[in-house]
Amino acid sequence: MAFEIAPEVQEALNESRPVVALESTIIAHGMPHPQNLETAQALEQIIRDHGAVPATIAVIAGDFKVGLTAAELFVLATEKDVMKLSVRDLPLAAAKRLHGATTVAATMRLAARAGIRVFATGGIGGVHRGAETTFDISADLTEMAETPVAVVSAGAKSILDIGRTLEMLETLSVPVIVYKSDIFPAFYSRESGFGAPMRLDTPLEIASFLKARWDLSPNGGVSIANPIPAADEIPAAKIESTIRAALDEAKKQGIAGKETTPFLLKRVNEVTAGESLKANIALVKNNARLAAEIAVALAAR
């Protein structure tokens, strides 16, 4: 097992230039081919265009990689046996020399080890609906309580229990910022029905918040929720019935644990005839832009 930082990323870190981490489950498990590869390439270019260096994170043949080559991105986008890796799974991928795509939690852990403080993703994991009986709560939340990385997302995924997710983040003392809105977003939708725990309106304000956060304590992350652009959203009232039907289908098929989210995203995309995939691509690009702007502002401080 090796821990490898791409030369471009390492040079930027050495020079205290802005770097933005990107996860890889969106490539291997979040989207079909070829949209997954096209989106991964587009995200890296958006980050470059906004003044930062992209660092897509994954495990390739058992080696931990911070920054991928074009060939490695292609492997993640096309191979069928890529593992979905949370933090607990990283040693298994290393031991068995496997390819693995990192979740929010695992990406945070590897980004922090490399010294990267800002990370862009689609949506965070959280408390699943029915967790009072299944205890299905994403490790993303506990990782945010421990690891000093700012996670820019479009909020919690719509398939989750958003109210309980926000309560859990509060219990874990994870600050939750909503960018330019008083309402917490719900992935495909700009509004979840829950208020913003905190609101900030510029990347500079967010960078100042992050500096103060880590000056007070070197541990713990920050959740930055960036609502999907209005032109690309699927209103919650429209998508909710589709999500409920997909959840019922997953339950009937006995799908649980880390297989739940990929199944639900795929099923919702099928039922919406690709509308949800378009929204997913739009929101993650929007998050990459904001993350780069925050990283640039943070580096300037």
Image: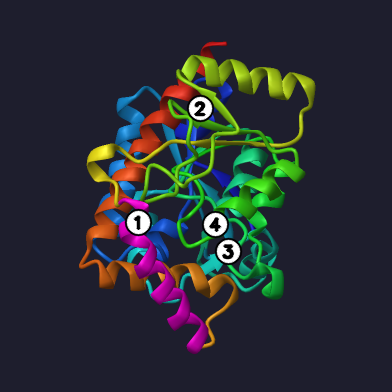
Category of crowding for the residue at label 1, using alpha-carbon neighbours closer than 10 angstroms: few (below 14), some (14–19), many (at least 20): few
Looking at the image, tell me whether mark 2 or mark 4 is earlier in sequence order. 2
Is the C-beta separation of discs 2 and 4 under 8 Å?
no
- x and y percentages locating residue 162 in the rendered image: 55, 53
Mark linked to residue 85: 3
Q: Nearer the viewer, mark 3 or mark 1?
A: 1
For the residues labelled 4 and 1, the Cα–Cα distance comes to 28 Å
**Residue shown at 33%/49% (left/top)?**
40
For the residues labelled 2 and 3, the Cα–Cα distance comes to 27 Å
For the residues labelled 3 and 1, the Cα–Cα distance comes to 32 Å
Left or right: residue 223 versus residue 168 is left
Can residue 280 be seen from the camera position used here?
yes
Is the C-beta separation of discs 3 and 4 under 8 Å?
yes
Looking at the image, tell me whether mark 3 or mark 1 is earlier in sequence order. 3
- Between 22 and 115, the residue placed more toward the observer is 22
Looking at the image, tell me whether mark 2 or mark 3 is earlier in sequence order. 2
Is the C-beta separation of discs 2 and 3 under 8 Å?
no
Looking at the image, tell me whether mark 1 or mark 2 is earlier in sequence order. 2
- Between 119 and 231, the residue placed more toward the observer is 231
Where does label 2 land, which residue? 11
**Residue shown at 43%/25% (left/top)?**
180
Q: Can residue 242 be found in the magenta stretch?
A: yes
For the residues labelled 3 and 4, the Cα–Cα distance comes to 6 Å
Category of crowding for the residue at label 4, using alpha-carbon neighbours closer than 10 angstroms: few (below 14), some (14–19), many (at least 20): many
Mark linked to residue 103: 4
Q: As shown in the figure, which amino acid type bears the numbered disc 3? A: Leu
Where does label 1 land, which residue? 237
Q: As shown in the figure, which amino acid type bears the numbered disc 1? A: Ala
Identify the magenta region: 235-253
Q: Can residue 145 be found in the magenta stretch?
A: no
- x and y percentages locating residue 8 in the rendered image: 45, 33
